[in-house]
Amino acid sequence: MTVGSVLFAWLTAVSGLASPADARGMLDRIGDGDLALLKNPQAARPARVLLATRVAASPERVREIVTAPESYRKAMPSFRRTDVVARRARGRGATDVQVAWELDVPLWNLEGKLWLRPRADGADLVLEEGDLAPGLFHLTVWPEGPDRPGGSVFVVEGFANLAQANLAARELSKRSPLAEPAMTVAATYVMLK
């Protein structure tokens, strides 16, 4: 069993931080804001987060974007590369792609490999090698309610090993048990937006 399989099993076995209806309801209460939830950051390691936002595009269009590796460089110019290096067939005609990535971060770059696993409602990003591994993020797209036709709710839920990403992250994590959860929320928010 690979690290990615274990991570995937762990994240799917643990109940989600919010249901689609709960996330939409909280976004309605927030108004123009975005939603950020995390499990008790001092109790659970790694810190697991859920972030949600509204998108003025159809669920089909958002799903198309999150399942295309080339869209990540367009969405986040700080990606120096997102190269497809392998493919593997999965049941029901689905194909996973392994992506070698490099992220431009001031003073140092982060890099690694992940598996992008398309799903009917989005995609999973399984970080198996390099910086931020191990990690797993579910990217899920839900249609907005009937009062907002044509829109979507985009949710990113998961975790990554940000505490070991670089020297600065390691030092911050040593000083405070809240550093890793804070870094996870910040990194996930960048991915969400």
Image (spheres, rainbow, N blue to C red):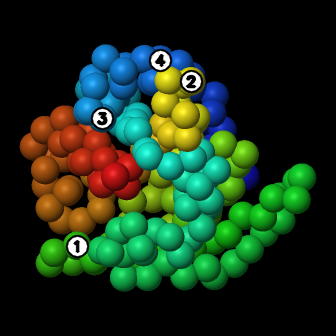
- Can residue 48 be seen from the camera position used here? no
How far is mark 4 from mark 1, CA to CA?
A: 34 Å
Q: Three-letter amino acid code at disc 3?
A: Asp
Q: Secondary structure at mark 4?
A: helix
Expressed as whole percent of the image width and height from the top left, the position of residue 189 reads 31, 47
Q: Earlier in the sequence, mark 3 or mark 2?
A: 3
Using a 10 Å C-alpha cutoff, classify the residue at mark 1 as few (fewer than 14 neighbours), some (14 to 19) or many (20 or more). Answer: few
Q: Earlier in the sequence, mark 2 or mark 4?
A: 4
How far is mark 3 from mark 2, CA to CA?
A: 20 Å
Q: Three-letter amino acid code at disc 4?
A: Asp
**104 left or right of 60?**
left
Foreground mark, 4 or 1, reads 4
Which residue occupies 55% across, 58% down? 66
Q: Earlier in the sequence, mark 1 or mark 3?
A: 3
Asked if the residue at tag 1 contacts the one at tag 4, i.e. Cβ–Cβ closer than 8 Å, the answer is: no
Q: Earlier in the sequence, mark 1 or mark 2?
A: 1
Which residue occupies 13% across, 38% down? 176
